[in-house]
Amino acid sequence: MHPAQELILKKRDGDALSRDEIASFVAGICDRSVTDAQIAAFAMATWFRGMTAGEQMALTLAMRDSGRVLDWSGLGGPTVDKHSTGGVGDMVSLILAPIMAACGCYVPMISGRGLGHTGGTLDKLESIPGLQTDLASDRFQRLVREHGLAIVGQTEELVPADRRLYAVRDETATVASVPLIVSSILSKKLAEGLDALVLDIKCGSGGFMEGVEDALSLARELSGVACAVGLPCNALITGMDQPLAWSAGNALEVREAIDFLKGDARHERLHAVVLGLSAELLQLAGCAASPEEAADLARAALDSGHAAERFAAMACAQGGPSRLLSDPGSYLPSAAHIAPVFSDRAGFITRIDTRAIGLAVVQMGGGRRRAADAVDPSVGLDCLARPGQETRPGSPLAVVHAADDGAWQRAAATVRSAVTIGPEPPASAAAVLTRVIGGEENDS
């Protein structure tokens, strides 16, 4: 029997796989001695049988070692990164990375593209004219060393096993398998050569996990395995029952992130998540001795303008315009048809179907249903209303940025149906719900 068949048989029957068996299977994924059918069978068996902590560690490390692991020797500070499970209006990476660089850390951030109702950091950045995210590893490392940060896509050299395994998972409805999620995320972060990692696990109608308990379970698995393989890692569970910011859509989110960095306007929930994640990461990286000190460092990086300067330097180094921060309106693309959508009744906004808001952007061409879909960076929503906000007939719920009137009409209808209005305001909901420290929940 072929070794891959033996491994599938063991996993199908619920037996634990050895480190050598997993390493051999991952090597077969890379050299193609393991077929797509065998990868699919392994993924489905893992979906039903799960993995022990030892198996997850072995799979994560084998996938990390399937390609190059970046070396940051000689840097004057720690290398750090964050990972988000994705949301609507989630521009945190565009703000957090320059904050961390302004605080003396180095951020080799390898990000992804949007799929479904959630946006992607690379799509947002690529709405900036000329900015390149497809960089070779050597140039990526040089930019991080020179500027303290760079945000790029996954290169061919890093974790090649994940690309093939993920493609099969996507075809076989096994993307949501927690052990495979854990190994996919962490193998890429370990390949970055990090000293510390923070996780932003979203829950709610616009999150990857709708329930808090499911989000906590994923956070515990991810942070526990990361710490076990030597990567200090904490997680925050954050709410995604409403958009995280005022805008959703690539160029619109870049504009809001620039306004945030410059101090022109800072959405309260976005501010809470950015500061919370920054404080976790600064503590993990040894840059602060307490949560209060870490939060103060992050605030100082923002309020001094140093974080904005880091973002401007990064954008320019990756091919973007040198005057982006001083005149973003001259560079970021604008949609052809821009108009507000209004409420038709009085009351208070009690609920927002955040997933529907994200899908409204996708409908307009601002996201993708399939990985190969093209994206229009100019379309989206801004001035989004929030739960608790009072409305009257004629009050704006959002401003829709669309390519034409037909797309505007469809998006406006989606926005209206996504917003629930009632006679009383809802209870306020925190942006940061709880912490997970090294795999264990902590409410402090």
Image (cartoon, grey):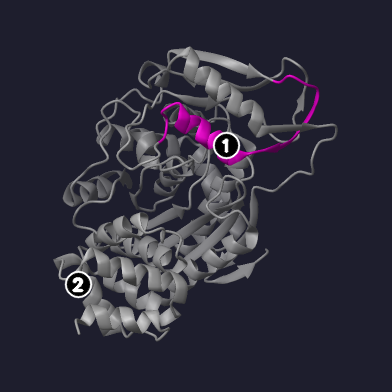
Label 1 neighbour load within 10 Å: few <14, some 14-19, many 20+? many
Q: Position of residue 250 (x, y in %)?
A: 42, 31
Q: Where is residue 128 in the image (x, y as percent from the top left)?
A: 34, 28
Residue on which disc 2 sits: 27
Residue on which disc 1 sits: 356
Q: Position of residue 14 (x, y in %)?
A: 43, 83
Q: Which of marks 2 and 1 is nearer the N terminus?
A: 2
Q: Is residue 211 left or right of residue 381?
A: right
Q: Which amino acid does label 1 sit on?
A: Ala
Q: Does residue 181 show up magenta in the picture? A: no
Residue 110 shows in this picture:
yes
Q: In which quarter of the image is residue 242?
A: top right
Q: What element carries label 2?
A: helix
Q: Is residue 246 left or right of residue 162?
A: right
In the rendered structure, which segment of residues is drawn in magenta? 343-367
Residue 229 shows in this picture:
no
- Mark whose residue sits in front, 2 or 1: 1
Q: Is mark 1 on a helix, strand or loop?
A: helix
